[in-house]
Amino acid sequence: MGELGWVEGWPGGGIRTGRLWLREPEAGDRGAVIELFCSAEVGTYVGGPRERDEMERAVPETPRRRHGLFVVDLDGAMIGIVTIDRHGAGSKGHVRPEGEEPELGYMFLPEAWGHGYATEACAAALNWAAEALPGEPVVLCAQTANTASLRVAEKLGFTEVERFEEYGAEQWFGLWTRRG
């Protein structure tokens, strides 16, 4: 996936929802970022967990800030991340011939699962994307075995476009239709 680049309307103070704050990364998030990528549970559908020593070397003291990367904060603690990046033209699955559609991605720490945080945070990020990238289709790709992610996609209003085999597993590829 490629970065969004500059977009109008970047939320300087982040985005607040009923329970969450989607904000830029900060130095205090480093430990949670490492835990997120090293978690065996989180890694199940994203290529497996990363090695802790690799992540300790790779994650800078102050995580890099960029458009489309949101830390999901609950009561002052990072519980996950939501990203909107460009779905690479060379990747499988597209809704326009040139590709490069904005793609929603997210990962949450296991203790945050089952509380509706992913749906709440992703809905806020999608609403931001609809304003910041008007007229652009937003896509999502998830392994079909990841039934929790497919439920979140359905709640958010994604509709299936196609399925394909990639990374040794069947993938579900969907398009977001803005509601209301």
Image (cartoon, rainbow, N blue to C red):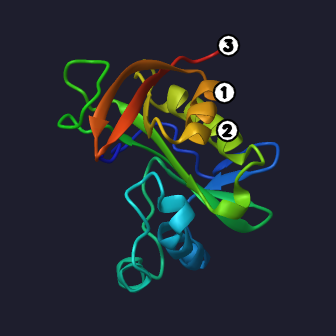
What residue is disc 3 on?
A: 180
3 vs 2, front mark? 2
What residue is disc 2 on?
A: 119
For the point 52% across and 42% down, the residue is 146
Q: Position of residue 99 (x, y in %)?
A: 24, 27
| First along the sequence among labels 3 and 1 | 1
Please tell me in which quadrant of the rendered image residue 5 appears.
Answer: top left
Relative to 123, is 12 above or below? below
Q: Position of residue 179 (x, y in %)?
A: 64, 16
Q: Is residue 94 visible?
A: yes
Q: Position of residue 60 (x, y in %)?
A: 41, 79
Please tell me in which quadrant of the rendered image residue 122 appears.
Answer: top right
- The Cα–Cα distance between marks 3 and 2, rounded to whole angstroms, is 17 Å
Label 3's element?
A: loop
- The Cα–Cα distance between marks 2 and 1, rounded to whole angstroms, is 7 Å
What residue is disc 1 on?
A: 155
Label 1's element?
A: helix
For the point 52% across and 38% down, the residue is 9
Instruction: Tell me: 48 left or right of 157.
Output: left
